[in-house]
Amino acid sequence: MTASTHTVTNQVPPLVGYDVFSGDRALAEGLERHASPEVLDEARAELAALGLAAGSARVQEWGTQANENSPKLRTHDRYGNRIDEVDFHPAWHQLLDGAVSAGLTDAWGRPDGHLRRAAGFYVWTQGEAGHGCPLSMTHAAVPALRTDPELAAEWEPRLTSHRYEPGLRPAAGKAGALFGMGMTEKQGGSDVRANTTAARPLDADGEYLLTGHKWFCSAPMCDGFLVLAQAPAGLTCFLVPRVLPDGTRNVFLIQRLKDKLGNRSNASSEVEFDGTWARRVGEEGRGVRTIIEMVAATRVDCVVGSAALMRQSVAQAVHHAAYRRAFGGELIDKPLMRNVLADLALESEAATTLALRLAAAQDAVQSTGSEAERAFLRLAVPTAKYWVTKRCTPVAAEALECLGGNGYVEESGMPRLLRESPLNSIWEGSGNVQALDVLRALQREPEALNAFLQEVGKARGADHRLDGAIKDLLTELADLNGIEARARRLVERMALVLQGSLLVRWAPPAVADAFCASRLGGDWGTAFGTLPHSLDLGSVVTRARAVG
C-alpha cells in the first residue's frame, strides 16, 4: 500500500522519444537554406533518422552509462608485459558505432559533406558529447594527410569509412580507423613551437623515431595520431600509428589518464614516446603549416559542439517549463520565466545559425575553391570559436536553474551538460589564443577582413541597431591603440555583429528583433531574462521548444 504522502504530482516527464533534428527549427531551416537541392531530401532523411536515435531512451541511457563508467587504464597485463590499453564501457563503443555509421567522420568526399556532417555532429552530440573528441580529430586529420598523397591514399578511406572497428591491430586489416592528435606539452601549452619532443630520422625516407612526451593526448585507443616534434629542420608533423604494420605495438606509453571536470566518458592521457616509430607528414620544419587545417576543422567542431550543448540545455529548460506548474499556471506562461527562456533561446539559435554558416563555407571552399569563403573562414572561425564556446557555460548554468533543484540533481542530465560546457572554450586554443589569432589575421590578411565585412554587410539597412553596431565595429577596427589588450572586446563585437547579420537575414522577425535589441542595441541587463518586455518573447520560446 502506497502512503498518501508518496503520491507524485507536478513532476515533468523526461524529454525522450523525440526527433532531435526535426524538433529543432533553427537547425532544420539551416539545412534547407544551405544544402544543395539535389541532396536536401537525402540529407533531411538521414538527419531525421539520426535525430530519432539521438532522442531515444536507448541513446540517452548510453550517454549516462558512458559517463558513469569512466575509462580505465591498464598499463600492464597480468604477466607484467606493457600493453598501454584503455578499457571503455560498452556504451562508449555503441555511441561511436552509431556516430561513425552515420558518417560523422565523412565530410571531405561527398556533396555538402561539411554541412551534413556538422548537422549530424550537432544532433548526435546532444545524446553524449565526450565521444565527439575522436570523431572530430578523425574528421579533421584528412586535410593534414592530404599534404602527402601516399599517406592520404592509405589512410583517408579508413578515416572516412562508415565502419567502426575498435581494438588495437594493424590498420591495414581494418575497414575503419580513428585518429587522435598530440600537440600540447608540459612546458608549452598552446605554444607548440616550444615543443621538445625530438624526431630522429631513420635511413628510410620519411621515417623517424620520436622521443618525448605529450601532456594531453586525447582518445589514446585511436589507430593513429598526428603529433608535432622537433626534426633537424624544425617543428614537423608526424603520423604515429598505435600498431605497426607487422602487428607489433608501437612504443606509446600511457602514463596516466586525466581526472577531468567533465568529458568523463572520454579518455585524455599523458603519453611518453621512447623510440616511437613515426612517418613524416608534409615537409620538415613546416609542422604548423601542415597541421593548421586540422586545427581549423577542429575549431569549427568546437563551435558546433558548443551550439549543440546550448541547444540541449535550452530544449530541456523549455520542456520543463511547459509541464511544470507553479503559482497557478505553467511556468512557460509566466512572463519572467518566458523572458529567461527567450533569452536563452536567442543565444542558442545565434550559435546554431553561425555554426551552420561556417560548415557551408567549408563546403564552398571544398567544392569550388572559393577564395572569398576561404578568406571569410580565416576570421570567422576564430571569432566564432572565441564567442560561441564562451557563451556555452552561462547558457548551461541558467538552463539548469530553470529546473530548480531538480536541475541540480544528476538524474536530470543538466549537471553533465554544465560540466561539459567549458571544454570547447579550452580545446584547440583558449579564448586569448583565439582573440590573438583574429588580430593576426586582421594585421596580415586584409582580404579576410574584407570578406568578413562583406558578409555582415549583406544585412545592412535591415535593422538600425545592426547598422549602428557595424559602424561602431568599423571605428574599433580603425583604432590600433592598445589593440592586444582590447582583443577580447573587439572579437566579441565581431561575433555579435556577425550573428546579428545572419539572424536578420534568416531568422523569424521576432528572433532577429530580440537579438538586435539586446545584443546590439544595448537594451539588455547583465543576466539572462533581462530582455525588453515589449518584444514578442512568446514566439521566440515557442520556436525553441523541442517537438517532433
Image (spheres, rainbow, N blue to C red):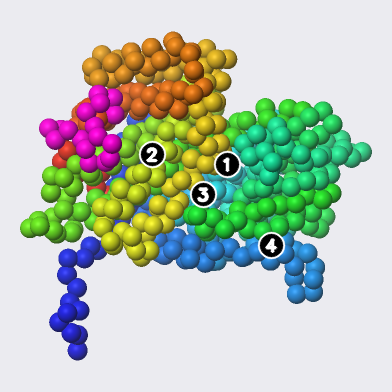
Instruction: Reply yes or no: does residue 523 show up in magenta.
Output: yes
Q: Considering only order in the chain, which callout, 3 or 4, is on the residue closer to the N terminus?
A: 4
The quarter of the picture where residue 44 lies is top left
The CA distance from mark 4 to mark 2 is 36 Å
- Numbered disc 1: secondary structure: helix
Mark 1–mark 4 contact, CB under 8 Å?
no
Q: What's the amino acid at mark 3?
A: Gly
Left or right of 153? Residue 444 is left
The mark closer to the camera, 3 or 1, is 3
The CA distance from mark 1 to mark 2 is 25 Å
Q: Which residues are magenta?
A: 519-535
In percent of width and height, residue 153 lies at 70, 38
The CA distance from mark 1 to mark 4 is 23 Å
- Numbered disc 2: secondary structure: helix
Crowding at dot 4, Cα within 10 Å, few <14 / some 14-19 / many 20+, comes out as some
Q: Considering only order in the chain, which callout, 2 or 1, is on the residue closer to the N terminus?
A: 1
Q: What's the amino acid at mark 1?
A: His
In percent of width and height, residue 102 lies at 49, 49
- Numbered disc 3: secondary structure: helix
Say which mark, if any, is on residue 238. Answer: none
The quarter of the picture where residue 479 lies is top left
Q: Going 65% across and 34% down the picture, which residue do you hit?
A: 191
Q: What's the amino acid at mark 4?
A: Glu
Q: Main secondary structure of the magenta part?
A: loop
Q: Going 25% across and 26% down the picture, which residue do you hit?
A: 522
Which residue is disc 4 drawn over?
A: 85
The CA distance from mark 3 to mark 1 is 10 Å
Say which mark, if any, is on residue 132. Answer: 3
Which residue is disc 1 drawn over?
A: 139
Q: Nearer the viewer, residue 484 or 302?
A: 484
